[in-house]
Image (cartoon, grey):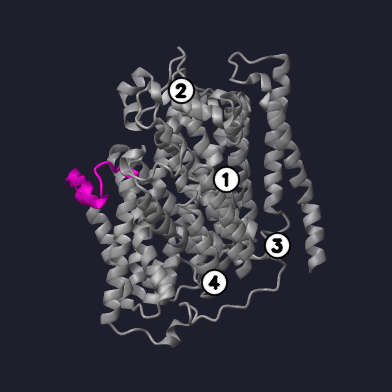
Amino acid sequence: MNPALLLLSSSTLVHLSPVDLVIIVFYFALVLAIGLYLKEQANTGEDFFMAGREMTAWVAGLAFLSANLGSLELMGWAGNSYKYGILAAHWYWIGAIPAMLFLALVMMPFYHICKTHSVPGYLKLRFGPGAQAISSVSFAFMTVLMSGINMYAMAVVMKVVLGWDLNFSILISSITVAIYVALGGLRSAIFNEVLQFFLIWAGALLIPILGLIEAGGWDGMKAKIFQNLSEMHVANPGAYTHAWSTLGHFSDNPMGINWVGIVFGLGAVISMGYWTTDFLVVQRVLAAKDLRSAKLAPIIGAAFKMMVPFIVILPGLLGLALLRDPQGHLLRLVPADLAWSPAGQAQGLHGYDEVLPLMLARYCGPGLLGLGITALVAGFMSGMAGNVSAFTTVWTYDIYGALINKNASDESKVKMGRWVTIIGVVISIGTAYLVMNAQSIMDYVQELFSFFIAPLFGTVILGMLWKRATPAGGWAGLLAGTLSSVGMYTWVKLDHSAVRYVALSMDAQDQAQNMFRALWCCSICVIVTVVVSYLTRPKPDSELKDLVYGLTPLPPEEHVSMFHSPLFWGAVVAVAFIVLQIIFW
Amino acid sequence: MKTGGSLSIWFFVGVSLAVNGAVILATGLYELSSPPEHAVVLRNLHANIWWGALLFVLGLYFSIRYSPARERARLAGNS
């Protein structure tokens, strides 16, 4: 398609100039050049699937974070902060930092020492092929499905924001990702994720800076939010700028959640499950060159993760404070399905997820706008590349190598990896068109995916810390936890009054329901694992060496200076995390 | 730091920031003489000039610090 055709009609949110297009085209050219350059360095399985296990802490740490910054993370959470206020920042703070530090300091030694290629690979070593099969098949299936769903979501956003054709967005982004991942494997994905990390910050950081200047600083912004929400007769307008003080009761905050859901549902289960067992992010850390780098990488990721609310949550809050329509009236954003419906489009409504592009268009002229759009595209592509590279590894090692061709050579695995990358992208494209015709699938699958990792965390953590956990216990617990999460979700969908049992309150909004459902299914997984383990024969200690705490001789800490010690930097990040909670209490 | 031959990831980051910064800075300077039709909010702060300059300088630093010639020399020194 001629790039000139991409220039926008008057109905789109922002208008790109030729300078903006130059910046976007340069980005695509650079990521393809990186893929071509790295092709020669992806000849063995270790190179292609694990990036040679030679990444420094900084590279692995930034890629670890960038893989998560993808998909709809940027616009989705900016939209959530517009909808729920600063409570959305919990997904970056208590919903990430403790788990990332736990991964770094407690779990990473086990992943690193057993030299697994994947999380399902660890489950095979610890619990046997049954748990590996459940985990790898569900992960591969959900990953490629999620990749397609995010691709479609990206295309919709690009259509609404820029007026780009849906097919054009899907094909260009997916072909680019397929080329650079198929050529350079995980190393290429990681290189591009680091590049995308910088572009995301370069493109998005200006919005909060200029927004705070316009709003009159943090206090000015708070006052404007309070005034605007009061004008709109929103209950508890002050709750939008306090992270903890409104969590005493479900009805005191816009999310309809209490501190139990945030601390235990989000902080202890969902977050721990995602950051410590979701192979999409863990794979980046497994590529670190040594144990100290593997421990430092999540800590570096955590330090930057704490700052992401500045470019994601703050623009949402600034949108609440500053956005007005052309007549000068307060601009009230609405749910996406309403905004993107024909009626909503006719009325000129905007969805919550459009708050970031709206703020971008507010402050960024030619050039800066192109960089901002590049940041959004880079976010989508890093997330998609993360999904595809994780899918490729799990398919090749945990399905093809474990179930189909157990004697596959290293060379054939690399060949399989390149083909599966392309096949994974093709399936993702198919999924994107599938959800185009049945959009409700998108919401269901995105929510369900988050539930699968909650029981997986229960299984992995018991496997690492409790030697009495048996293969039968691990398999049964994982299955029971997964089925119970699907069951609770279906129950609420069929009978909404079940929310009072699943989420303890009828005030609970979607996110609150997710937190409690994760808490219950993880608890069920743990209980079933413990009960079945006590009823079955444990593995002998000799078979658990390098897999379980207490039976794994951890290498002695290197004698490094305090400033090179993971423990020291972990403590620094933990203190900064606590200070942030107090500041925004 | 061996992260993929003689071209470091930081070199690619530097090139990207330098090129983007240069384009944004040049656009900002051009707009001083030819203001755009649709002005953005806080245009008087000329964000594209100082933000573009910042990215350009940062990108230039990374590009030089991790240039292929320096990386080859460093790798040769390590081996």
Callout 3: residue from which chain?
A: A
Asked if marks 4 and 3 touch (Cβ < 8 Å), the reply is no
Residue A358 in the figure: left or right of residue A299: left
Residue where numbered disc 1 is placed: A307
Of marks 2 and 3, the one in the foreground: 3
Residue A16's x, y, as percent? 56, 24
Asked if A570 appears above or below A514 in the picture, the reply is below
Asked if marks 3 and 1 touch (Cβ < 8 Å), the reply is no
Looking at this view, is A469 or A199 the one in front? A469
Looking at this view, is A130 or A581 the one in front? A581
Q: Which residues are magenta?
A: A489-511
**Sequence order check: which comes first, mark 1 or mark 4?**
4
- How many neighbours does mark 1 have within 10 angstroms: few (below 14), some (14-19), or many (20 or more)? few
Of marks 1 and 4, the one in the foreground: 1
Residue A563, label in figure? 3
Helix, strand, or loop for circle 4? helix
Spatial CA distance of label 3 from label 1 is 21 Å
Spatial CA distance of label 4 from label 2 is 50 Å
Of marks 1 and 2, the one in the foreground: 1
Spatial CA distance of label 1 from label 4 is 26 Å
Residue B33's x, y, as percent? 73, 14
Is there one chain holding both mark 2 and mark 3?
A: yes
Is there one chain holding both mark 4 and mark 2?
A: yes
Asked if A145 appears above or below A246 in the picture, the reply is below
Spatial CA distance of label 2 from label 3 is 50 Å
Amino acid type for the residue under numbered disc 1: Met
Amino acid type for the residue under numbered disc 4: Pro
